[in-house]
Amino acid sequence: MSQYLLAIDQGTTGTTVCVFDERARLLGLEKTEFRQIFPQPGWVEHDLEDIWDSVARSIQAALKASGVAPQRIRAIGITNQRETTGLWERATGRPVHHAIVWQCRRTAEQCRRLKEQGREDLVRQRTGLVLDPYFSATKIAWMLSEIPGLRARAERGEIAFGTMDTFLVHRLTGGERHLTDVSNASRTLLFNLETLDWDNELLALFGVPAAILPRVVPSSGDFGTTRGAPHLPDGIPVCGIAGDQQAALFGQACFDPGQVKCTYGTGAFVLNNTGERLVRSRHGLLTTVAWRLHDRVAYALEGSVFIAGAAVQWLRDGLGIIRSSAEVGPLAAKVDSSDGVVFVPALTGLGAPHWNPSARGVIAGITRGTTAAHLARATLEGIAFQVHDVVQAMAGDAGVPLQFLRVDGGAAENDLLLQFQSDILRIPIHRPKVTATTALGAALLAGLAAGVFRDLDAIRDLWERERVFSPQMPEEQVAAHLSRWETALGKA
């Protein structure tokens, strides 16, 4: 009898739920978008109740699309936007504030002060991360300081903190479980990469009470069972959790050291599996936990690009030159090149390897002949240029050039983007048959714990390639593109 896995991919702009079978075939998928809240310039929030509603609606629709009865779901996996930070009441589950999203820059001043105090080396050594508003710790500190009475309640143990995986486990299990996995914990600025636990010195540095923290567990295991969850019967095991980028690395079957993937979502994220070796970057990358299976941990180097698909959304929502994100590819294909137009999409600062929170977007090279098609093409190229910078930094840390790149995410459906990416990186780009690999990774982690899959080798055999993009552009043309990019980048 077939076995079915349900994966919840709680993302930045919406929640996607997928149903897979034991051959990792996608049977049903549904995405529900939710509000993006911008209280001030540079601030980004989500309503946790909006997120939960999007999860419930997507579960119902994905099950219907798949034709799989809820009672036949063997296990549930969760993957999520990682650093986004929520606080809620332990007793009621009621949020005490909107979640503060990973893109939010409101704590930039706090990060600057800590850097001036010479604390960044400690943070980097313990966590593998940089002092940046991107991560969870300063978001927690902001809420505890700005919401009257909240710090005292937190210290009394009345308040729970969680990234979105923790929030969803809490809701799915009827409030019974408060936990997170190692991959999400490693994105908070509070987690020690060597001890694989919360770090008391970092908690004191950021003023975060230990009483609010979830228990840290491996990425595949027992996270409780459903109780009172909408559209699902009670008793389904929740047994796979990983942050979205680590889940995508797992879903791409990048189990061996040196294997690399890039996910093109709201942002773009390049991860290089370094195995059990904790590699500290010398080129502006992050060190993170990829996953933990039983007692074996895998680490990764990561380069985080803040704005990728979000730049296309800006063309749609901000400029109105496309009506849907899917239109950007056909519009860009109307011209043979960007005609010298370069777009640096630093709409919320620059991430790896530059780490410049004050950078702002730049569009250079505009002439009277510039059209919406040129801007659309420059937007796709701007995404690829940022990924190029990360991959170059990664090769510097690894000491050897990368041999190929596996890709996934919504924008990985765009052939023009992937061909340009291959051209400027000068390596093959491998696109899998299932590009919803973030959700797939969560499903595979759950299936591993539930006994659907025997081991990693059994999962490896399921990965299938759909297409390879190989370099075609002449090297002198690539050099000209990169030169224009460097010039525009200097103006961001």
Image (cartoon, rainbow, N blue to C red):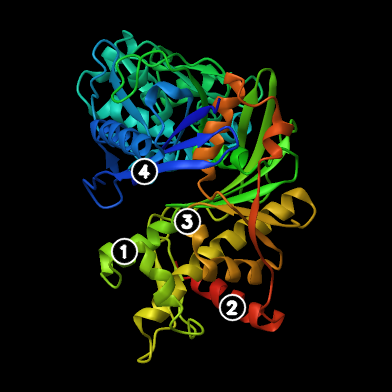
User: Splitting the image into 4 quarters, where does residue 22 fall?
Assistant: top right
- Residue displayed at 23% across by 13% down: 92
Helix, strand or loop at mark 3? loop
Alpha carbons under labels 3 and 4: distance apart: 31 Å
Which badge, 3 or 1, is on the more N-terminal residue? 1
Which badge, 4 or 1, is on the more N-terminal residue? 4
Residue 122: % across, % down: 59, 31
User: Residue furthest toward the bottom?
Assistant: 368
What residue sits right under mark 3 in the picture?
350
Q: Which is closer to the viewer, label 4 or label 1?
A: 4
Alpha carbons under labels 1 and 2: distance apart: 28 Å
Task: Kindly identify the amino acid type of the residue bearing the numbered disc 4.
Answer: Glu
Which badge, 3 or 4, is on the more N-terminal residue? 4
Which badge, 1 or 2, is on the more N-terminal residue? 1
What residue sits right under mark 4 in the picture?
30
User: Residue furthest toward the top?
Assistant: 156
What residue sits right under mark 2 in the picture?
481
Helix, strand or loop at mark 4? strand
Alpha carbons under labels 4 and 2: distance apart: 38 Å
What residue sits right under mark 1 in the picture?
324
The reply to whether callout 3 and callout 4 are in contact (CB within 8 Å) is no
